[in-house]
Amino acid sequence: MIYDVIIVGAGASGLFLGANLKSKKVAILEKNSIAGKKILASGGGRCNITNRFVSAKNYLGEQKFIEQILKVLTPDQVLKFFSELKFSEEKQNQFFCDSGAKSVLSVLLKRQNADIFYNKEVLGAKKIDEIFEILTKDEKFRARNLVIASGGLSYKALGASDIGYKIANDSGIETSALAPALVGFSVQKDEFWFKELSGVSLNADVEINSHKFSGDLLFTHRGISGPAILNTSLFWQKGRICINFLPKFNEKNLINGKKQLSSVLPLPKRFVLEFLKNFGLKDRAFYEFSDKERQIIKRLFAYEFAPAGTFGFERAEVTKGGIKIEFLDENLQASNIKGLYFIGEVLDITGMLGGYNLHFAFASALKVARVLNL
Ligand SMILES: Cc1cc2nc3c(=O)[nH]c(=O)nc-3n(C[C@H](O)[C@H](O)[C@H](O)COP(=O)(O)OP(=O)(O)OC[C@H]3O[C@@H](n4cnc5c(N)ncnc54)[C@H](O)[C@@H]3O)c2cc1C
C-alpha cells in the first residue's frame, strides 16, 4: 500500500498535521507506545499551549521565514481548535489548560485523520523514483509525501531521537549546530553557594548580551533554573551572564536603617545569609560594613558570572538549532526533494518560554497541511 502522506512522530506537530489533513491516506509512525509524551509533560502537566501575543520576535531563527509561518495560525485559532477545553491566561500572557495536558492530547487524538502506528521507530528514509520508502525495524512503509515531525534531542526519556537530522543529512540537507535550550545552568566553584540554596526561588532580572529576562529564578542542587534562566539559556553558548537579585529595590534604601541586611533586603533570608557566608561576611546593618564589603553587597544588583554549562539535553525543554531554513521552500518542503517536509522543533527555529514552541509546532504543521490539502 502507498500512503499519500507519512508523518514521522506523533508529537505536537505530527498530531496537529494529522488532525488537519483532509481526505488523504495518512499514517503517523511513532516510536513510543503512546502519542504525545512531551505534550503530557508540557507546562508541568498543564500544557502552556500558546500565548496571547505571538510574533517572530519570540523565536530564534530567520525572522521573515518565521513570520510567514506564524501568519497561518493565530493564538485565537489555537484556542478555537481546542474549543471544548477551557484555558486560563496566566502571567506573561500564557494560556494553560484547566483540565491538564492529558485533555489536550485527547483532543488531538480524537480529531485524527491519520492511522497511528505505535512502536514504530523510523530508522531511515529514501526516495526511490516518486515514492518514499520509510524503514522501521520490522516493516517498510511507502508514501508519496514524507513529513518529518520527530522533534529535537531533548528529553530522550520522552522519545527524542536524531532521526529528523539524519534523514535531512542523508538527503543533502544541512543542520545547524544543536544545543540544549530552555534549560538550567550548572555552576563553577565560585558559585557553589547556589547549590546550598536548593529549593529557594526569587524574582530577578537576568541579562545576557543585550537581552534581559525578568522572572522567577530557582536554585537547584546543580545550579540555577526557573523561567528567567531558561530564557537566558537560549542566548548562551559560553561566557558570562549577569543577575540582578534586587530588580525592584533601590540601592539608596540600603544606607538608611539600622536593621540587619537580611531584614532590609526583599530577598529570602536563607539567600542573604548564604550570600554573606560565601563572602565571609556577617549579617549586619549596611553602615557597619567597610567600603570593600559594601562593594561585595552591591554585587547583588549585578552579579556577573560564567555558568559551567547547562543541565544538558536530558533536562532541556527544547533543542536549539536544527534543519537549516535555506534548504527549504516557504512551505517547509525540501528544495531538492519534492514531497519531503520538516515541521516543529526539528527546524532551526526555537521559541522562548511561554507557549511559543507548541504554538510553532501547530503553525508549521498547518502550513504543510494547507499545501498537502490542495
Ligand atoms: C518538560 C517539557 C515541558 C514543555 N512545556 C512546554 C509548554 O508548556 N509550552 C510549549 O510551548 N512548549 C513546551 N515544551 C516544548 C514542546 O513540548 C516542544 O517544543 C514540542 O512538543 C515540539 O513538538 P514536535 O512535534 O516538534 O516534537 P515532539 O512533540 O517532541 O514530538 C516528536 C515525536 O516524534 C517521535 N519520534 C522521535 N524519533 C522517532 C523515530 N525515530 N521514529 C518514530 N517516532 C519518533 C517522538 O517519540 C515524539 O512523539 C516543553 C518541553 C518539555 C521537554
Image (spheres, grey):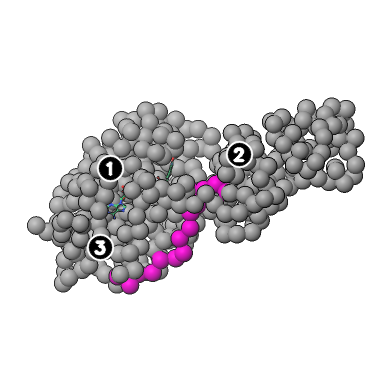
Work out how far the residue at label 3 is from the one at label 2, CA to CA, in angstroms: 41 Å
The answer to whether residue 327 is seen in the rendering is yes
Q: Is residue 330 above or below residue 51?
A: below
Work out how far the residue at label 1 is from the one at label 2, CA to CA, in angstroms: 33 Å
Mark with earlier residue (3, 1)? 1
Q: Is residue 27 above or below residue 238?
A: above
**Label 3, residues with CA under 10 Å away: few <14, some 14-19, many ≥20:** some
Is 169 contained in the magenta span? no
Mark with earlier residue (3, 2)? 3
x and y, in percent, of residue 305 in the image: 68, 52
Q: Is residue 123 above or below residue 128?
A: above
| Between 221 and 215, the one nearer to me in the picture | 221
x and y, in percent, of residue 354 in the image: 49, 42
Find numbered disc 2 in the image and state the secondary structure of the residue it sits on. strand
**Label 2, residues with CA under 10 Å away: few <14, some 14-19, many ≥20:** many
Mark with earlier residue (1, 2)? 1
